[in-house]
Image: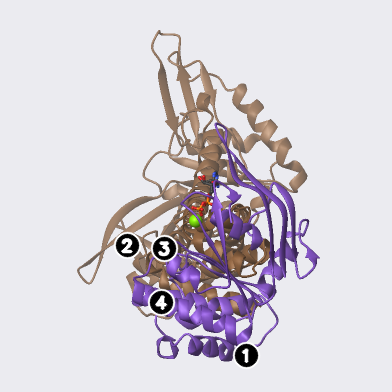
Chain colours: A purple, B brown
Amino acid sequence: MISLQNIQKVYRTSTIETLALNSINLNIKKGEFLSVMGPSGCGKSTLLNIMGLLDAPSKGDINIDDQKLNNLSDKQLAQFRNKKLGFIFQSYHLINDLKVLDNVMLPLLYRNSSEKERKQSASEALGKVGLSNRVKHFPTQLSGGQKQRVAIARAIVGKPEIILADEPTGNLDSAMGNEVMDILLHLNKSEGTTIVMVTHDEHMAKKTHRLMRLFDGSQVQ
Amino acid sequence: MLKNYLKIAIVVLRRRKFFTFISLFGISFTLTILIVLTAFIDKVVGDNYPDRKRDRSLYVNRLQEIGTRSGGINSSSGGMSFYFLNHYAGSLKTPAKLAISSNFNSTNTYVNNKKIVINYKYTNADFWDVLDFDFLEGKSFTKQQIDNGERVAVISAEIKKEYFGDEASVVGKYIEADNVQYRVSGVVKNVPITLYMIYSDIYLPYTVSKTDYNNSGYRGNYTGILLAGSKADISKIHQEYEQMVSRLPMESKDFDKIFSHAETFIKNYVSTGDEEKSGVAYAITAIGIFALLVMLLPTLNLVNINVTRIMERSSEIGVRKAFGASSKTLIYQFIVENLILTFLGGLIGVVLSSVILQIINSANLIANLELSLNFTVLFIGLLICLVFGLFSGVYPAWRMSKLNVVNALKMQ
Ligand SMILES: Nc1ncnc2c1ncn2[C@@H]1O[C@H](COP(=O)(O)OP(=O)(O)O)[C@@H](O)[C@H]1O
Ligand SMILES: [Mg+2]
């Protein structure tokens, strides 16, 4: 499903050059749940951003669904992300100006759908994460665990085949973290969604199909 | 899609009350100033009652005598004498007619023990031909009446109401000013005081003036309007007047230069100050800079507020891009937001200006000046709004769209 070949990422500033990723080769099968671990600054987020087409690699090829994605235009990239990918971030990144339902509906704004369909899909997605009763709240009125569940609902509302989660439980206590993890596991099992998750928690990593370890930008396991 | 943009925009504007307030305030305030200013200019320059032949009139309202020989500087400037205008300006070949009138003076009069302040002005007979007054009743006084020194008066509609109350016709009745009784020969529509060379409450024949109109000094308190037979004669008359002035003999040893010009309405209206410092240039530059500031500062400010606001929302931009918004889509979104904002601001501005114009009119701050919000002004206002909206939206939106998603998400 996702294939990375010889990926390298170099960050250049006027003073220093950081090799954030060094010759990464990775194949992720459809329906697989992969966790990525490693010390802080080893390149986990960089890897996820490149997979998610949010950032371009300095070298190497990315294929998703046998489609080579190196030289797409801004508009094509946007469409691809919209259809195939869903993101979950450590700090939720909800839009505080919008109500929970409008936050969840957001990905559907960028494809052809009616207002009614959008509301319907968003309500369904919120139902899956157990937040049907918080539709009209604003994000600031929610707890951290609830915010992350809204973020998951937003990631799954467009029924993407791939979900990329960067430390989704990093800001949550273990009870809330487990709730979020259970939702992801269930999603993977029942809908066959491919998931790549960065985590610091060995315990959670053990629940996934495969673990990848990074150290200083290189794959060590 | 547009419906979504509108919805998002309204949600955002409602949630960001402080920002919305500041922006709306800035836009509506600027627009109000502009509209009131244009209404004013429009009135003074555009509405030309009663000098409807403005395009073939030249105005003479100042004469300055300067002496530099005695070491120090002697200077005398202001209006001209009746004699000067009649004798010298009246001797020019090309002008068809020459209106001469004094500056207005005020006097008190009493009706039923109520004090009324009356402004009066002396005129010659041509004054009534050069200017197209609307007579509500009666007519102007004739050359014959002037030559006979008859005590007759043309009065304004306003003073008729104040002095005579609701009487239907007052022609032939008497009005008292400065302890003299004048017989009313006609009533004219009010002239705004901004046309200070023409405005008055009552107009009298110059021959009934108590000051000696035969005094042959140059300076006095009269002004003149030279009417050309056709537009083509304007520059010729201007030249003739210049030549006439350059040939004037000096009045006394104290002076060695005389300045006086016959200018078009606009030039005459904005010309102030002393001769050597070119009042026209000053006034035009000043008005230009003022107008530019009035328009530019709020625009820049708005762009600035918008850049800050949009950068503040970089996390939102990152999220939208991550979930499928293209840069183009986002630019549209922000422009729509701005257009709505400026349009609302414009609407408030229009309402605010009509209220202010109403207040200015009803308070009668400026005598007889009826400002109105006309369609040209409204159109200009809305156009300015649109330009504001686009200009203040496009640049920040463009900057924002360049933002890389990862960096946008990192900025908080
Ligand atoms: N925009 C950037 N500019 C320069 N260096 C960066 C940038 N983003 C990340 N880095 C560097 O790249 C390395 C990997 O970062 P990151 O992928 O965020 O690590 P992790 O998510 O594993 O903590 C770090 O050394 C970090 O300092
Ligand atoms: Mg990270």
Looking at the rendered image, the disc whose residue lies closer to the viewer, 2 or 3, is 3
In the image, the residue with mark 1 has its CB under 8 Å from the nearest atom of ligand 2:
no
Please state which amino acid type lies under the numbered disc 3: Phe
Assess disc 1: are there few (<14), some (14-19) or many (≥20) residues with their C-alpha within 10 Å of its C-alpha: few
Specify which label sits upstream in the sequence, 2 or 3.
Answer: 3
Which circle, 3 or 1, is nearer the viewer? 1
* Marked residue chain, label 4: A
Question: Residue B112 or A61: which is nearer the viewer?
Answer: A61
Which quarter shows the C terminus of chain B? bottom left
Letter of the chain that mark 3 sits on in the rendering: B
Disc on res. B19:
3
The residue identified by callout 1 is A117
Q: Nearer the viewer, residue B357 or A205?
A: A205
Q: Amino acid at mark 2?
A: Glu
Residue matched to label 4: A178
- The crowding category of the residue bearing disc 3, from other C-alpha atoms within 10 Å (few below 14, some 14 to 19, many at least 20), is some
**Quadrant in which residue B241 is drawn:** top right
- Per the image, label 3 sits on a secondary structure element best described as helix
Task: Tell me if A57 is positioned left or right of B188 in this view.
Answer: right
Q: Are marks 2 and 3 in contact (CB under 8 Å)?
A: no
Q: Residues within 10 Å of mark 2 (few under 14, many from 20)?
A: some
* Residue under label 2: B176
